[in-house]
Image: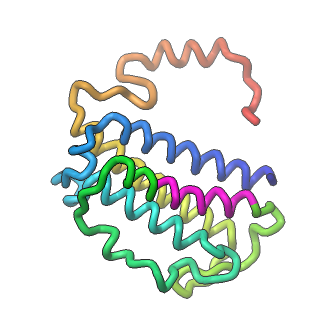
Amino acid sequence: MSPIIESLRKEFQRYKSLAEGAIAQVSDTELCAPDAHAGGNSVAVICWHVAGNLRSRFTDFLTTDGEKPWRKRDEEFEPRLVTRQELLARWDGGWQVLFDTLSTLEDRQLHEPVSIRGEALHVHDALHRALAHVAYHAGQIVHIARLLRGSAWNYLSIPPGQSDAANAAVARAPRTPKS
C-alpha cells in the first residue's frame, strides 16, 4: 500500500477502535437508548449511520457517486432496537467496504476525480472528508458511552491525573515512526 493511503487507513482504524472501545463498555440495552445530550441519537443510531455512509461512499468509489440511490440516509437516524450482534455486523460491514477500497488505492490516484452528491472532489479530498466524518461520530459514540457509564468508564486514552506518567513513559521510549 502507498504511504499516504496507509497513513489514512491507520487513522480510520484508530477511530474505529476508539468507537469500539466505547461500544464495548455499554450494555446491550444502553446501545439503543436515546441520549438527550446527543440530540436523541443512540450509539446504535450513530453506528448505523456511519456504516451506511461508509458503504455508500466507498462502494465503487472511483466510478460512481458516493451517495448511492439505494442508500436511505434518513432511515439511518430512526430509533432502532437491534442486538449487539446485529449492530456490529452492520458496523463491520460498512468499515469492510472502506478498508477493501483503501487496499486497492495507490498514492498516485489521490488527484483523480470522484463525486459525492454530484460535487466533484479529488480522491484525497473525499478521503479526508470521510475521515473527519468518522472522527466526528466516533467522538459522539465515546461521549455518549462515557455519560452512560459514569464513574465506571474505562478511559480509552490517558486518564485524568496520569499525563505526567504517560509523558515520562513516552520520553523513555525509542523515537522511531511506527510502520
Residue 130: % across, % down: 54, 63
Q: Which percent across, then down, holds residue 69?
A: 48, 85
Q: Residue furthest left?
A: 36
Q: Is residue 99 left or right of residue 28?
A: right
Residue located at (40% from left, 55% from top):
137
List x then y, in percent, for residue 152. 25, 25
Res. 34 image quadrant: bottom left
Q: Residue furthest right?
A: 108
Q: What's the residue at 39%, 78% (across, down)? A: 72
Q: Which image quarter holds the C terminus?
A: top right
Residue 126 is drawn in which quadrant?
bottom right
Q: Residue at x 24, y 33 (%)?
A: 149
Q: Main secondary structure of the magenta part?
A: helix
Query: Magenta part of the protein: which range?
Result: 91-103
In the displayed structure, 74 sits above or below 84; it is: below
- Tell me: 70 left or right of 25: right
At x 58%, y 46%, the residue is: 13
Q: From the viewer's perspective, is 123 left or right of 29?
A: right
Query: With 163 as the anchor, is 44 left or right in this view?
Result: left
Q: Is 83 colored magenta in this rendering?
A: no
Check residue 99 for magenta coloring: yes
What coloring was used for the rendering?
rainbow
Q: List x then y, in percent, for residue 135.
A: 47, 52
Compared to residue 113, the image places residue 163 above or below, namely above
